[in-house]
C-alpha cells in the first residue's frame, strides 16, 4: 500500500486500541471518553451504552501494570 489510509471521523465512530505489551484494550467513544478493558464484551457494552458510564470529560489513562517475567 503506497497511500495513507484516511481515519474515519464522525458522530458515531468508536475506536478500540490494544495497549502494547499488555492484555488491555482501550475503548474510545465518539464523545471522547476513554476506558481500559480486559474483556472485549464489557468494552462493547460500555461503548454502545453511550452516554451511560461516560463522564463529561475523557478519563485519564490508567498506569500500565508491569509484569514480572
Image: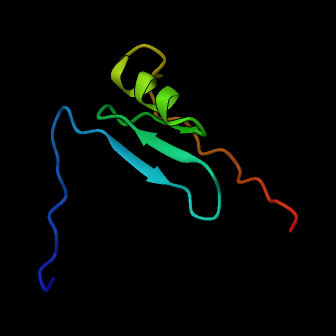
Is 67 located above or below residue 51 in the figure?
A: below
Tell whether 53 sits left or right of 13.
right
Image label count = 0
Q: Is residue 54 left or right of residue 7?
A: right
Residue furthest to the right in view is 68
Residue 19 in percent (x, y) is at: 55, 56
Corner quadrant of residue 1: bottom left
Please name the residue shown 16% across and 76% down the image. Answer: 4
In the rendered image, the vertical position of residue 66 relative to residue 57, given as above or below: below
For the point 57% across and 37% down, the residue is 37
Is 22 situated above or below 41?
A: below
x, y percentage for residue 29?
35, 34
Asked whether 56 or 61 is in front, the reply is: 61
- The residue at 71%/54% (across/down) is 64
- Image x and y of residue 6, in percent: 14, 63
Quarter-wise, where is residue 66 in the image? bottom right
Task: Write the residue at 23% across / 39% down.
Answer: 13
Q: How is the image coloured?
A: rainbow
Q: Residue 45 vs residue 59: left or right? A: left
Q: List x then y, in percent, for residue 67.
A: 82, 59
Point out the residue furthest to the bottom here.
2
Give the vertical position of 15 relative to 46 (above or below).
below
Amino acid at each position: 500500500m503506497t497511500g495513507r489510509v484516511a481515519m474515519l471521523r464522525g458522530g458515531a465512530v468508536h475506536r478500540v486500541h490494544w495497549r502494547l505489551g499488555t492484555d488491555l484494550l482501550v475503548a474510545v467513544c465518539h464523545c471522547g471518553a476513554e476506558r481500559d478493558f480486559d474483556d472485549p464484551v464489557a468494552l462493547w457494552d460500555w461503548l454502545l451504552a453511550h452516554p451511560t458510564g461516560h463522564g463529561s470529560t475523557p478519563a485519564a489513562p490508567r498506569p500500565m501494570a508491569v509484569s514480572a517475567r
